[in-house]
Amino acid sequence: MTDELGAKAPKYHRIADELRRDIRDGVYRPGDRLPAETTLLDRFRSQLPSLSLPTLRQAIALLRAEGLIESRHGVGTFVKENRRLQRRSRSRYGRARSDKKLLTSHLEHEITFAGTGPVPPHIAEAAGLDEGTQMVIRRRTLRDRETRKPEELGASYLPMEYANGTFLEEPSVVPKALFLCMEDLSGKQYAHAQDQWLVRVPTATESDLLDLATGSQVIHVIHVARAHDGALLEVSESVWPADRIVIIDEYPITQEPEPPDVPSDI
């Protein structure tokens, strides 16, 4: 059994990871019924001999909480027809360094604009830039490959000193993750990132492009990435329909007392 969290991860996490991959890879498709608990126990006990039914049920509960599956009383557990897309921010870079694919390679990318221009005020504020700073801008729409349904609106803002006059000003999909392209062009590595999350009412343009119903909300993230020396390498933003995604953040819990760099308000 392989897993994204390592061999020391709790058993239910490792089982959930494997079932999650099965769903992602189409082994279990939307609407499919998952195997019975006894069948799943037999499957995973070949790799985890001491696996118990409560542990298996913890894994099922985790996938249910993520919106991937649903249980129907007296019938069974099924892959959701309209499951939520998952964003696992902390593992995105490592995975893309390994497979050299786009960060969202499961979606179809359309570059709607590529060129230079002034950054919007909210991007300047997030990155500590002067309002109106010129950057290379790449705007994109991401769609489900099968249904062509729009799933994400996004944009990346790249420093002129690295991206100006390069292929990043062309309205074509890059051959690998954008951050890998920027590392090649800048000679620097992405070392630190900050994400700012906001749930808000969509603009009229966003509602139209994402085909949102009246009263819908969107989740808006602004991602600021810097090199080891603090140099700004990229600011990106993504907008999703709030009812179509789930944000999953897994991290080690500090065991020793330490003061926070910035206290949390909630």
Image (spheres, rainbow, N blue to C red):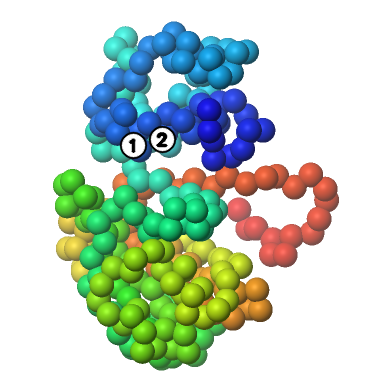
* Quadrant of the rendered image containing residue 214: bottom left
Taking depth in this image into account, of 248 and 72 the one nearest to the observer is 248
Q: Secondary structure at mark 1?
A: loop
Residue beneath label 2, please?
Answer: 21
Residue type, mark 1 in image: Asp
User: At 59% from the left edge and 39% from the top edge, which residue is drawn?
Assistant: 5
Q: Is residue 201 visible?
A: no
Q: Position of residue 111 (x, y in %)?
A: 25, 70
Query: Which residue lies most toward the right here?
Result: 257
* Quadrant of the rendered image containing residue 150: bottom left
User: At 41% from the left edge and 68% from the top edge, which residue is drawn?
Assistant: 178
Q: In the image, 242: left or right of 56? A: left
- The image's mark for residue 192 is none
Tag 2: Cα neighbours inside 10 Å, few (<14), some, or many (≥20)?
Answer: some
Residue type, mark 2 in image: Arg
Residue beneath label 1, please?
Answer: 25
Q: Is residue 186 visible?
A: yes
Q: Are marks 1 and 2 in contact (CB under 8 Å)?
A: yes
Q: Position of residue 22 (x, y in %)?
A: 38, 31
Q: Position of residue 143 (x, y in %)?
A: 23, 55
When the figure is inspected, residue 95 is found, relative to residue 72, above or below; the finding is below
User: At 67% from the left edge and 33% from the top edge, which residue is drawn?
Assistant: 8
Whole-number angstrom distance, CA of label 1 to CA of label 2: 6 Å
Tag 1: Cα neighbours inside 10 Å, few (<14), some, or many (≥20)?
Answer: few
